[in-house]
Amino acid sequence: MKIIFATQNKGKAAEVKAIFANSSIVIISLYDLGNNIDIEEHGTTFRENAFIKAKAVYDIYREPVMADDSGLSIEQLDGRPGVYSARYSGENCTYEDNNLKVIDELKEFSEPHTAKFISYAVYYDGKNEIEAIGELPGKIIKEQRGTNGFGYDPIFIPDGYEKTISELDFKLKNEISHRVRSFNQLKNKLI
């Protein structure tokens, strides 16, 4: 079976293709198709945004689609940045802008700053919808450390580790990530 993965991100596409590598499912990304669709994510939950992407791509290709939406949820910030993780500091902000905003907002709270990365993955084929959620629990620290990650990785330490995700080996990060967890669940449900 062929499934279109609604992403133009080469790294994310490679990660998901690796998850499905030893299965009967072939993953083709929007990047592979040369399609640079601009999909407005106007949902208020990760689930809504993932489904918005899946449906938009399905409506174009009329073939089965997978999509995901992910972000960071911090307990002391009532789940923020949440679905606004990528643009938490405003449009055209940098990863560092977002990290510094989170660190600043957490100054008024005592440690630990409990948080989790969430990935909500969906499969949609025009009538069937299958969903999976992957979470990576951890905590936020006061300074950025490491150079191997992106987004909030330099300020996030996963439970059971002493290093930030940006300090971890790339292979290990991909074994424990919230995205790997959600897409492994989705794969198991599809197979």
Image (cartoon, helix red, strand yellow):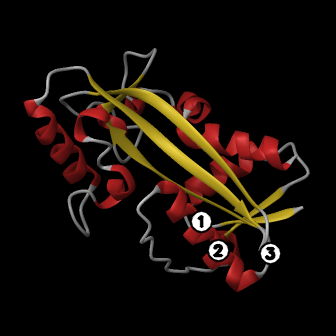
Which numbered circle lies on residue 63? 3
- In this rendering, would 189 be left or right of 104? right
Q: In this orientation, which residue lies closer to the viewer: 54 or 101? A: 54
* Mark 2 residue element: helix
Q: Position of residue 164 (x, y in %)?
A: 36, 27
- In this rendering, would 27 be left or right of 25? left
Q: CA distance from mark 1 to mark 2?
A: 6 Å
Q: Position of residue 55 (x, y in %)?
A: 64, 74
Tell me: residue 40, above or below residue 124.
Answer: below
Residue 183 appears anywhere in the view: yes
Tell me: residue 30, above or below residue 46.
Answer: below
* Mark 3 residue element: loop
Which numbered circle lies on residue 79? none
What kind of residue is marked 1? Phe
The reply to whether discs 1 and 2 touch (Cβ–Cβ < 8 Å) is yes
Q: Pick out the residue farthest to the left.
A: 108
Q: Which residue is mark 2?
A: 55
Q: Residue at x 42, y 72 (%)?
A: 42
The reply to whether discs 3 and 2 touch (Cβ–Cβ < 8 Å) is no
Residue density around tag 3, few if under 14, some if 14–19, many if 20 or more, within 10 Å? some
Q: CA distance from mark 3 to mark 1?
A: 15 Å
Residue density around tag 2, few if under 14, some if 14–19, many if 20 or more, within 10 Å? many
Q: CA distance from mark 3 to mark 2?
A: 10 Å
Q: Position of residue 141 (x, y in %)?
A: 24, 27
Q: Between tags 3 and 2, which lies in front?
A: 2
Which numbered circle lies on residue 51? 1
Q: State which tag comes first along the sequence, 3 or 1.
A: 1
Tell me: residue 114, above or below residue 40.
Answer: above
Q: State which tag comes first along the sequence, 3 or 2.
A: 2
Q: Residue at x 90, y 61 (%)?
A: 1
